[in-house]
Image (cartoon, rainbow, N blue to C red):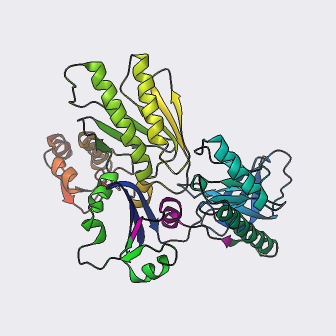
Amino acid sequence: MKKLLIDILHDYLRAALIEDGVLAELAVEDKNDEPQAGDIFAGRVMQIVKKQYAFVDIGAEKNGFLQLKPKQNIQQGQALIVMAEKPAYGEKGAALTLDISISGRLAAVTNDKNGVGISHKITDSAERERLSRAAKAALNEKYNCIVRTNAENADENALKAEISALSERLDDILERGKFTKPPYRLYRAPREVHRLIRDCLSDGDELIVNNKKYFDEIKNIFANTSLYEKDIPLFTEYGIEKEVEKLLQRKVWLDCGGFLVFDYTEAMTVIDVNTGKFTDGGDKEKTVLKTNIQAAKEIARQLRLRNLSGIIVVDFVNMRKKEDIETFETEFRRALSKDRLKTVYVGMTELGIAQITRQKQSVPLHTLLTVPCKACKGSGEVPDFKYISGIIKNKAAFLLSQTVFETIVIKAGHDLASLLRTNEDLFETAEKYGKKIKIETIETGAADYFEVGH
């Protein structure tokens, strides 16, 4: 049985999906109205670059980015109906597409020309054929669809009814878009929490929410919903708050004693696997395989919890035996297959680096819940204070020798100021010119910040 906990904070909405007593997925929504994956807009083309891509005004802070296909005749100033494929991230606006679709629990209806697609997670050939026939029977001539994993073994009439309803809704959206002045959002796709309810919960599962207003809304969507009214906060009661804190840390410990280290870059996520102090009876190869398999399972879980996407590379501990590599890869693929988003294990490079890609649906957890450190500007490092002391000494020497000021004032944060007060070279420089140096402590979040003046 699954349990979904929904916690309403002042600026955030959080949902924790518990499977077999273990936190399996965490969704966090900022209460802003920025474009998200699946939103459909009437937009206007603001700029075309090299006939390869266009920037489209969709009414957001940043213009959306549309990759143009060959022979696509799109002009600057043209009105378009577009859908967000990926949300805005960093300096980039939302990624857009002209292939418009809306999703239900069993299927997604789309205006592209790719025919009826069946989720790759449905592997039984007879079931795929049954679902394909049902989908084709429900579609009109304008649309195609993708049958989702949830449709496996579903009633054909339920699938047909959903496809018909989605087709009618898409009709309405596209028709309104023809007469709507851009920029305007024509359709707001279900947000992450609603997608968890739609995609992950079924009869027999339980949903608990700690907000009366939200409870009144959700109970109409999912019947087995209860209102949490205890004094102890919901996430604290179920031990989720501590789990959330761990998800913002770089290091994740494994039960065997090894650990993972997560690093994030603009291009990809990099994960390092370490055996730590774990030794399995002194058998090195056995230790390595056991660590890698446990790491693979935990990485698959962390990808869902941290909402990591795009290119992910993992430096597993090097395995020598071919059979060990095959065992490991089987376990890794099995763990990744539990993800509701499309996640692909690409394989190992010659250097033993595992490559993974994961569909992007919303921003990573660390991006949503953290901001760059003022001290290190997000790098995780600050200049060495001894080096900064030398720079300050040179700036002070210039002012002492080239100006008429009798006293030079150096202002810095507490730790840097304390170090400067013990810098004999700095005060000897002042004595050389018969002048004085005064050091003052200031409040600053930047560890390496300083001022040299008079």
Observer-nearest residue: 349 or 381?
349
Q: How many marks?
A: 0
Residue at 44% from the left image edge and 61% from the top image edge: 27
Residue 204 x/y as whole percent: 43, 65
Q: Which residues are magenta?
A: 186-207
Lateral position of residue 2 relative to residue 427, left or right: right
Quarter of the picture holding the C terminus? bottom left
Does 291 appear above or below 71? above
Quarter of the picture holding the N terminus? bottom left
Residue 355 in view here: yes
Residue at 35% from the left image edge and 26% from the top image edge: 317
Observer-nearest residue: 210 or 358?
210
Residue at 42% from the left image edge and 64% from the top image edge: 205
Residue 212 x/y as whole percent: 39, 83
Observer-nearest residue: 418 or 146?
146
> Residue 370 appears in which quarter of the rendering?
bottom left
